[in-house]
Amino acid sequence: MVVAEIEFNEVGFVYQPGTPFEVSALRNINLTIESNSYTAIVGHTGSGKSTLIQLLDGLLKPTSGRLLIGQSQIDANSTNRQLAQLHQHIGIVFQFPENQLFEETVIKDIAFGPKNFGKSESQARELALEAMELVGLNADLSERSPFELSGGQMRRVAIAGVLAMQPHTLILDEPTAGLDPRGQREIMELFASLQQQQHLTVILVTHQMEDAAQYADKIVVMNHGEVVKVGTPRDIFVDPIWLKNNHLMVPKTTAFAQRLQQRGFSFDPFPLTVAELAQQIKQQLESGS
Amino acid sequence: MFSKVLFGRYVPTNSRIHQLDPRAKLALSFYFIIIIFFANNWISYAFLAVFTLAVILGTRVKLSFFWDGIKPLIWIILFTVVLQMLFSSGGHTYWHWGIFTVTQFGLINGGYIFCRFLLIICMSTVLTLTTPPLLIADAVESLMKPLVKIKVPVYEIALMLSIALRFVPTLLDETQKIMNAQRARGVDFGSGSIWKRIKSVVPILIPLFISAFNRADELATAMEARGYRGGEGRTKYRMLKWHRQDTLACILMLVVTIILAGVRHY
Ligand SMILES: Nc1ncnc2c1ncn2[C@@H]1O[C@H](COP(=O)(O)OP(=O)(O)OP(=O)(O)O)[C@@H](O)[C@H]1O
Ligand SMILES: [Mg+2]
């Protein structure tokens, strides 16, 4: 397995430079993402999260600075060829990925990626079936048209289509938007297990602070095209005033714990997930404070 | 590539021309395109070109940006003009090979056609550059209103036009997103044989059609849910108002016409 470390070096990106529509979407980004880590990128809408991940997959070229992704260096002068090479090892699940489905059958759609990267018909089929199992799709759906499936199933087909390419880094742009709560949890659990069992590097863009708090090792906070803070979930979520100033919500668990604190509970370390919170409340109630 | 083409895009620089009534701009652009065909010698073309340039400068859009925006279209015109020149007759023959002939009249005609197309493109780009699409649709509706009497479905045409104009940027956005998703799955749009390139369009077109149909469906539902039942008697949120500057613009165009009529006889 290739160990890829991602490094942003003074990266900047401008949309449509030299026109009246010019938008400076990213400025002076310095960031390191270790392999096999789980990084969450959070930030107000329009802060540049989607732009950042498109740079990672070579869909956009930085207008200044450079990126190191494994062995390859990407900067403003990189050729399309170099960019295309990134697609193979970095899988990206876009917002509402079911919009990318187009084949007649589920299995063909999932096998589309591997085939583009030079796998034979039968190898691609094999990979597609494996990916279907990973995302929890029943194998007898494989010959159905993807457009006859439910929204949640379509989402899984699209995710399987990305996993079938066997990327070592998985980028997720709000992968659970619009799913029911149970579907959301299942999908998030799937990504967490892929990171732990298959040693993928996962980068999650999300507006759900609960997901960031629960799954990520590291959280990157963006605001107005800049990285304003990088730290563990605990570093990020302890300071509600700072969060508010950066247009971020406090995870519900943290907010709940803060309310309890005003009523005489005391938490140390501060709980981030429901499990941690329940554990600490139980302890304090039992010790009878 | 598409991001460069300026035709059909609104650039809000809030110049004098932006502030004109859209009906005045629409009618005057049409009128100008018609009088272009009355130019018959180099002086008249030069005069119209100078006028067009002045109007472009008047939009307060950077000239280099404007030029970049129409350059892709110029290649298409050049192509047609060159084809035209290869099959011409009349006057002195410069070159002859098989079915191809290049003659004196052919060259001159080609030059005129090129100028005409260029002026038409520049003026219509100015129109879309300075007028938001929905206002253009309003202007069309307002100018066509007399036709209601002879049973032309003016409101329906205006509605179709404004929906189409409204969804052009949305569809372009959608195309970009789908292209990104398929590129991430290893589709290479820019290279390979013709057959491969044609095949690479399928993964874009199918999702695009599906989303366009879904959108149309949702839009229809939303309109019905809010009680839309045709244009008869509907009031407008944006009211078009005719100002003095619009009358002045019309007078200016009249002056241009008179001068053009003068230089035609040189
Ligand atoms: N194709 C584009 N052309 C011009 N500007 C763009 C384009 N895409 C994004 N932008 C601008 O770049 C900035 C960053 O956008 P981006 O999509 O990266 O934000 P985001 O953090 O992903 O937001 P969201 O949370 O809403 O998805 C925004 O100001 C946006 O308007
Ligand atoms: Mg985004």
Image: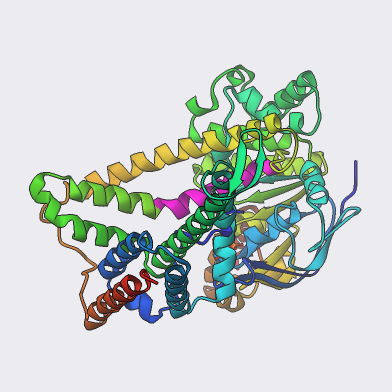
Residue drawn at x 49%, y 46% as measured from the top left = A178
In the image, is residue B174 part of the stretch drawn in magenta?
yes
Ligand 1's image quarter is bottom right
Q: Residue B94: x and y, percent?
A: 64, 49
> Horizontally, is A95 left or right of B162 in the view?
right
Residue drawn at x 29%, y 75% as measured from the top left = B258
> Horizontally, is A168 left or right of A21 in the view?
right
Viewer-nearest residue: A59 or A158: A59
In the image, is residue A59 part of the stretch drawn in magenta?
no
Q: Residue B202: x and y, percent?
A: 59, 32
> Horizontally, is B191 left or right of B128 in the view?
right
Check the picture and name the quadrant holding the N terminus of chain A.
top right
Residue drawn at x 73%, y 67% as measured from the top left = A63
Q: Residue B56: x and y, percent?
A: 46, 74
B68 is higher (above) or lower (below) than B113: below
Q: Quadrant of residue A282?
A: bottom right
* Number of disc labels: 0
The boundaries of the magenta stretch are B167-183
Q: Main secondary structure of the magenta part?
A: helix
> Horizontally, is B23 left or right of A96 in the view?
left
Q: Residue B143: x and y, percent?
A: 20, 60
